[in-house]
Structures are given as C-alpha cells and as structure tokens.
Image: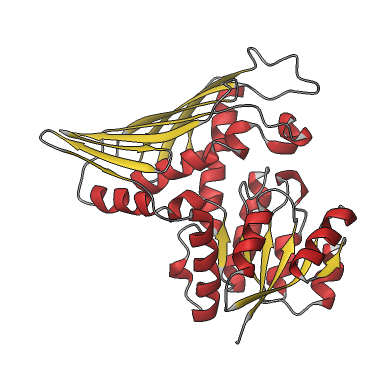
Amino acid sequence: MEKVKVGFLGVGGIATAHLKNVQNMEDAEIVAVCDISEENAKRQGATFQAAVYTDYQEMLDKEELDALFVSIPPFAHGDMEEQAVGKGIHIMVEKPIELDLEKAKKKAEIIRNSGVINASGYCLRYLDTVQKAKDYLKDKKIAMVRGHYITSFVETPWYRMEDKSGGQLVEQSTHILDTMRYLAGDIEKVSANMSLQVMEDIENIDIPDVTSVNVTFESGAVGHLDSSFIQHDHRMGVEILGRDFRMELNGTALSIIEKDKTITYQSKVDFYEEQDRNFIKAIKTNNQDLILASYEDGLKTLAVTLAAKRSNQEEEIVHMKEFV
C-alpha cells in the first residue's frame, strides 16, 4: 500500500478536524466525501479535492477506499459500518457508535469477524497526559473515581432530542465516562438520576439537563460522573483517589498529588491529530494495537451510558453483566 485512500461519511462538525488531519499526512489521501447535505459535500469536496457524493452506498460502490471516517449523528448509522467492512475497508466511527445496544453488538461482531482495523472516536485516550496518568496508575490501587462534564447547551437541533442523540450522557459526556473506564477498568454496576430541571423552555427538548451517575468498578472502586449543560462555560475532568495519592485531569492538564509533592503536566499534543495518525499508521502496518479506542471499546462505553439511562427509568441498579 502506498498512500491510504480515505473516504468520509459526514463532513460537518468534528469531521472537519479529521479532514484537515488526514490532508496533512504524507501517507494518506482524501479521495471521496459524502454528506446528505449536497452543499456541505460539494464545499468540502472542493476544499480537499475529493469526489463528492450524497449517497454513501454509491460512494462505497464506486470508490476504492482503504479507510473510512464515519462522522454522522448517532441516529443515522443504518448499515454503513457493515457495508464498509464487507468491502474490507478499515473504519473509524465517531462516538457514540450507536443508540441501540443490540444493533451495536451485531455491528461489533461483524467488524470483529471482518479483520479490518477499527477505531471509535474516544479521542481523550490519545492525550499525552492521559497516557502519563495510565502509566502512573498501573501499580496503584484505586479507591474512588470522580468525573465531571459541565458545559453549555449545544444548539444542534438533533442534540436536544432523546431519540436522535440519546441525551448528553450518551452523546457528549460519554468522553469522560470512557476516560474513567480507560483509567480505572471495566464497570460492574450502574445507578443514575437524570432530570430536565431548568432548560425546559428550549424548543423540542426532551433530554435531561442534569445527570448524576454512580458506578462500581470490577476492581471494587466506586465512582460517579456529574453531567450538565446548564452553564455558560465548559469544564471537564477526572479525579482518581487512592491511599495517599490523587490524580487530577483538569481539561487536558494532569496533576499528580502525593503527600510530599505535586507534579503538574500540560498536554503538548493535539489529541485528534494523534488519534487520526494512529489510525492511518495502524492501517499501514496492519497493527490494531496502535488503536487506543477500538469499536469494541466504544461498545463497552455505550453500554454503560445506556445502562445509566435504564437505571434512571426503572429506578434500579443495573448490573452490567446482565444488561449486556
């Protein structure tokens, strides 16, 4: 393989970052873009000198692609992934990978059996500071994990609709839940409370504006995640506590606090760029291990967010082994 031939399904929002990253890679080229908005597809096609499509099936049939970025709203996936991997195309699927757990599980099995390189869009794993945190924690016993994703409202029309986005936890603060899983291990039990408290005047809104999720990890550690979009600013982070130490990710910065010292690291990387470079390199070298967030990882994080929704609806603790 010379240059990796890359196609894009969805060219708005986060896809713009992926497009720029791939354009800047010597070992990859953008050959085709597809979007249901013909105007957007034509604009990005002209910008990146790529063939333009509004029908993904037509693009997959006509183009010889090595890799595909799927950057579309969670409700719109259909059978895109199955079609792509059936042609041997390596895929990077933005989060959340689906809204329906059973559909996602079937997709994961097909992707696994296809043998293609696969990734999900949990970009925070590619932060240098997250990697430092993971290395620091490898010989530590974790007692508690505290996460938060507090931000302002997203104006995108489908974001406010439960059947389109899944709500903030599934669509947005899933990044922090995934980081919690990545650093502290798989989750065993979930309970959650969610409510639409102060943003009910927004047209068509039916998602909660405040969410609190309690979890128990398989290690026995306990944790929680607070999520909301009722603020004017943006804050996100993860704090992990053990005996006589704590580790704080505040945005992209990392602080490690021990009894006699505190060390703070500032991130020096663009995590989207790192994610996309690893994906292309994994394809070039046929090495899935370069992918820090596989489709399967995306499935596991999706399952926890959907379990939290179930817990809120049923007012019960959800055991992940029974839920999945």
The foreground one among 12 and 176 is 12
User: Residue 170: x and y, percent?
Assistant: 60, 37
Q: Residue furthest bottom?
A: 1
Colour treatment of the image:
secondary structure
Q: Residue at x 75, y 37 (%)?
A: 164
User: Residue drawn 52% across and 51% down?
Assistant: 122
The x, y position of residue 255, in whole percent, is: 28, 39
Left or right: residue 260 compared with residue 210: left
Tell me: residue 84, above or below residue 294: below
Image quadrant where residue 65 sits: bottom right
Is 129 above or below relative to 204?
A: below
For residue 164, side relative to residue 288 (left or right): right
Where, quadrant-wise, is the N terminus in this rendering?
bottom right
Marker count (numbered): 0
| Residue that lies at the very extreme toward the left in this rendered image | 260
Tell me if I can see residue 93 in this picture: no
Relative placement, left or right, of 72 versus 311 is right
Q: Which quarter of the rendering shows the C terminus?
A: top right
Where residue 307 appears, x then y in whole percent? 55, 34
Frontmost residue, 68 versus 81: 68
Compared to residue 21, the image places residue 78 above or below, namely above
Residue at position x 30%, y 52% in the image? 132
| Closer to the camera in the image, 82 or 102 | 82
| Position of residue 36 measured from the top left corner of the image (x, y, whole percent) | 86, 54
Q: Is residue 256 visible?
A: yes
